Image: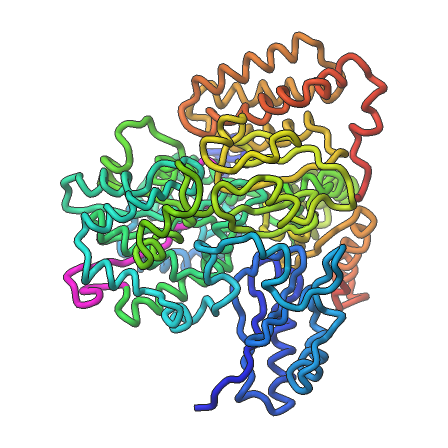
């Protein structure tokens, strides 16, 4: 067998494919072959590198040279110059605004402050090849759990690690597993929640696209711990690439006996099935998700009973988010002590954020808990686009709130963000600059939650609609001070009386923008002229 | 999005839906291990086949699965992915995720509406385009994003829109077979 001297890694995430990375890959393969290097140079499609702003990304290993914004026509130069002659193609290197060009990935500021646990294999391996995952220690954790650990030991390890739900709830994962394990039932289920509904967030998608086995392995470990034999991945139908990679991964795992009967020679049987969502934000709520898995309307149920007691078809069911699962295998291998040494007192480990909006480096970042917003937005994110002034950042998507300049030095954890009137959420982080009107941002989010309200409970169904109408009235400059008061009251009412998380958090964007940008609400009311220019979006940017 | 009024109980069943597609759908349902909880999967399959979910298809599924038609319609109307209206030859999806919104997607979608004289989720008079606003297609680095069928246009400006529309209108009359991007 010929030994490969050089690997050309090319990003095959949704973002990069949208800018033609598949054509780049094809051209690279053709030219490498034409030059006679087919045996020693391999072109590998990987998952998301995270640096979406600069995509498509091509990385040459072992030289560790990082090319950005590579087009199909650049393939020839990369092969002829870099691969054949060993000369770096200068013009395709990443350019840092102040420091100039940077050739190695490790030197790029975007990557420097990151610590990748959940994303450890994204952009490193070919997600469609199980052997690459195994080569980097994949399925070792499952083997260890099945052959050396009892079910209680697995749960204990996860509990001690301090891992909390990454979907936004922040409930301790080990405790959730323990509750499900304690239920007596002949059947139990484990479900992976991949219904990533927050518009502008793409953490789960990138993990599933870039490292699907990571999630399968963790689901098997969780199933072993709680005593389930069947797993379900509930994924949005809008993620065709993630679905196809998951299907490939499940097939490969079955072929190698890593899913199926008697896994690792134990008496543990486990298999995974994929269920598709159909575009409903509320299905991220676990009881709604379970209803949707059963083929019904995705409306939430009253809790209790919790899914751990009565879930899928009435059996005890454990639901965890994709990113939560992505942390399991490293905890089993490296131990809970290692994991709990990272992060803050109450929030351990790392968190993945999808950084987007008016920021220079749009992309996916993973940082230790306790990193400040300033570090994420300015050091990693490269600051605000076009040298504009930072105004606010929305975390937690439509359920979260805005944070302002004075709060940028808050170390991120579940508690600190909630305390400041926002929330961790699933990890969407939208940055806004001085040109954004915050009332309109609140209106945008309310339109979303109003649309997505399932209609089951009255406060949310009617409350979100009325709040949206009031916001429209205000932004149309027909509002009065009474309307602002009504909006405020309605907000706290909907928050306090809705059935599920969607309604309980829907008023957050209004409440937090009112808190910090009160004068912008007033601006629509007292002074008709003042905001007319700024309030109107000009075509283009 | 979908109003119950669109489905009439008394209207005759139209026969302009291809029989082969019903047969394929029937085969798909027959080879399932269990039809318990399989309604959403079946609807996905049906929408793939027919392009949309007209009343007759919904009723067919209801009978085949042995559940009330109302239950099928309840699920169809709940999920935004399912549509009861036929689609145009090309689907223009304007991303209205937050990342695209703060980079000006609202102006883009307004211009499309004006240009094509349709609202969201409507089909143009000539049947060529369906305009949709979608929630995040996941290419936030390229915001604002417009997708025509499977082709993604990134960092779209309002000035680019005429060009995009023309590319596809001209394809119809055969003036220009090549997509220019």
Residue A409 position (above or below residue B147): above
Q: Quadrant of the C terminus of chain B?
A: bottom right
Residue A369 position (above or below residue A52): above
Looking at the image, residue A436 sits to the left or right of residue A256; the answer is: right
Q: Quadrant of the N terminus of chain B?
A: top right
Residue B154 rendering spot, x and y as whole percentages: 70, 54
Q: Residue at 58% across / 51% down in the picture?
A: B138
Answer whether residue A269 is magenta in the image.
yes
Q: Residue at 17% across / 40% down in the picture?
A: A182
Q: Residue at 70% across / 56% down in the picture?
A: B153
A400 and B40: which is toward the camera = A400
Is residue A224 among what the camera can see? yes
Answer whether residue A270 is magenta in the image.
yes
- Identify the residue at the far top of this view: A482
Residue A514 rendering spot, x and y as whole percentages: 63, 20
Residue A247 rendering spot, x and y as whole percentages: 40, 62
Q: How many labels does the image show?
A: 0
Looking at the image, residue B123 sits to the left or right of residue A364; the answer is: right
A388 and A70: which is toward the camera = A388
B111 and A45: which is toward the camera = A45
Is residue B73 among what the camera can see? no
Q: Residue at 62% across / 40% down in the picture?
A: A374
Residue B49 rendering spot, x and y as whole percentages: 49, 56
Magenta-drawn segment: A259-282
């Amino acid at each position: 067998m010929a030994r490969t001297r050089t690997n050309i890694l090319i990003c095959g995430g949704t973002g990069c494919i949208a800018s033609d990375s598949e054509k780049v890959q094809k051209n690279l393969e053709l030219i490498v072959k034409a030059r006679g290097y087919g045996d020693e140079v391999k072109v590998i499609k990987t998952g998301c590198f995270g640096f979406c702003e600069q995509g498509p990304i091509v990385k040459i290993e072992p030289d560790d040279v990082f090319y950005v914004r590579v087009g199909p026509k650049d393939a020839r130069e990369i092969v002829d110059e870099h691969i054949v002659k060993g000369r770096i193609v200068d013009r395709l290197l990443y350019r840092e605004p102040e420091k100039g060009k940077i050739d190695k990935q490790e030197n790029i500021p975007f990557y420097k402050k990151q610590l990748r646990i959940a994303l450890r294999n994204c952009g490193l391996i070919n997600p469609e090849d199980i052997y690459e995952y195994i080569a980097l220690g994949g399925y070792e954790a499952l083997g260890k759990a099945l052959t050396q650990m009892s079910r209680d030991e697995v749960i204990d390890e996860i509990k001690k690690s301090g891992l909390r739900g990454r979907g936004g709830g922040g409930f301790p994962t080990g405790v959730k597993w323990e509750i499900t394990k304690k239920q007596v039932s002949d059947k139990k289920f484990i479900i992976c929640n991949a219904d990533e509904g927050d518009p502008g967030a793409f953490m789960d998608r990138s993990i599933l696209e870039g490292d699907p086995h990571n999630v399968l392995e963790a689901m098997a470990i969780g199933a072993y711990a709680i005593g389930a034999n069947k797993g379900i991945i509930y994924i949005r139908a809008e993620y065709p690439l993630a679905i196809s990679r998951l299907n490939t991964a499940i097939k490969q795992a079955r072929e190698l006996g890593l899913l199926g009967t008697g896994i690792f020679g134990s008496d543990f049987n486990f298999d995974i099935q994929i269920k598709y969502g159909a575009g409903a934000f509320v299905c991220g709520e676990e009881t709604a998700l379970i209803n949707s898995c059963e083929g019904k309307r995705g409306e939430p149920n009253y809790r209790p009973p919790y899914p751990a007691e009565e879930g899928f078809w009435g059996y005890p069911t454990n639901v965890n988010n994709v990113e939560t699962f992505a942390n399991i295998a490293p905890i089993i291998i490296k131990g809970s002590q290692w994991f709990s040494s990272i992060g803050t007192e109450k929030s351990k480990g790392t968190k993945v954020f999808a950084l987007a909006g008016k920021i220079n480096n749009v992309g996916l970042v993973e940082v230790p808990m306790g990193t400040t917003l300033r570090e994420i937005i300015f050091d990693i994110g490269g600051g605000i686009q076009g040298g504009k002034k930072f105004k606010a950042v929305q975390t937690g998507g439509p359920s979260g709130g805005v944070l302002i300049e004075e709060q940028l030095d808050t170390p991120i954890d579940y508690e600190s963000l909630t305390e400041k009137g926002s929330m961790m959420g699933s990890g969407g982080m939208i940055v806004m600059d001085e040109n954004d009107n915050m009332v309109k941002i609140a209106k945008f989010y309310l339109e979303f939650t109003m649309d997505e309200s399932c209609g089951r409970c009255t406060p949310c169904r009617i409350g979100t609609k009325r709040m949206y109408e009031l916001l429209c009235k205000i932004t149309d400059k027909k509002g009065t001070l009474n309307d602002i008061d009504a909006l405020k009251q309605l907000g706290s009412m909907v928050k306090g009386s809705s059935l599920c998380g969607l309604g309980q958090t829907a008023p957050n964007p209004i409440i937090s923008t009112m808190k910090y940008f009160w004068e912008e609400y007033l601006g629509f009311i007292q002074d008709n002229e003042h905001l007319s220019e700024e309030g109107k979006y000009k075509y283009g940017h | 999005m979908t109003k119950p009024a669109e489905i009439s109980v008394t209207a005759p069943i139209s026969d302009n839906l291809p029989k082969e597609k019903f047969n394929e759908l029937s085969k798909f349902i027959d080879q399932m291990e269990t039809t318990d909880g399989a309604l959403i999967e079946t609807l996905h399959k049906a929408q793939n086949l027919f392009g949309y979910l007209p009343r007759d298809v919904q009723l067919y599924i209801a009978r085949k699965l042995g559940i009330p038609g109302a239950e099928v319609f309840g699920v169809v109307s709940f999920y935004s992915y399912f549509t009861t209206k036929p689609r145009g030859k090309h689907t223009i999806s304007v991303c209205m995720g937050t990342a695209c919104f703060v980079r000006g997607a609202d102006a883009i979608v307004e211009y499309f509406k004006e240009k094509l004289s349709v609202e969201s989720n409507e089909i143009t008079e000539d049947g060529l385009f369906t305009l949709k606003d979608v929630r995040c297609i996941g290419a936030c680095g390229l915001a604002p994003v417009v997708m025509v069928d499977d082709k993604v246009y990134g960092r779209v400006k309002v000035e680019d829109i005429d060009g995009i529309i023309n590319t596809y209108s001209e394809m119809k009359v055969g003036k220009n077979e090549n997509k220019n991007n």
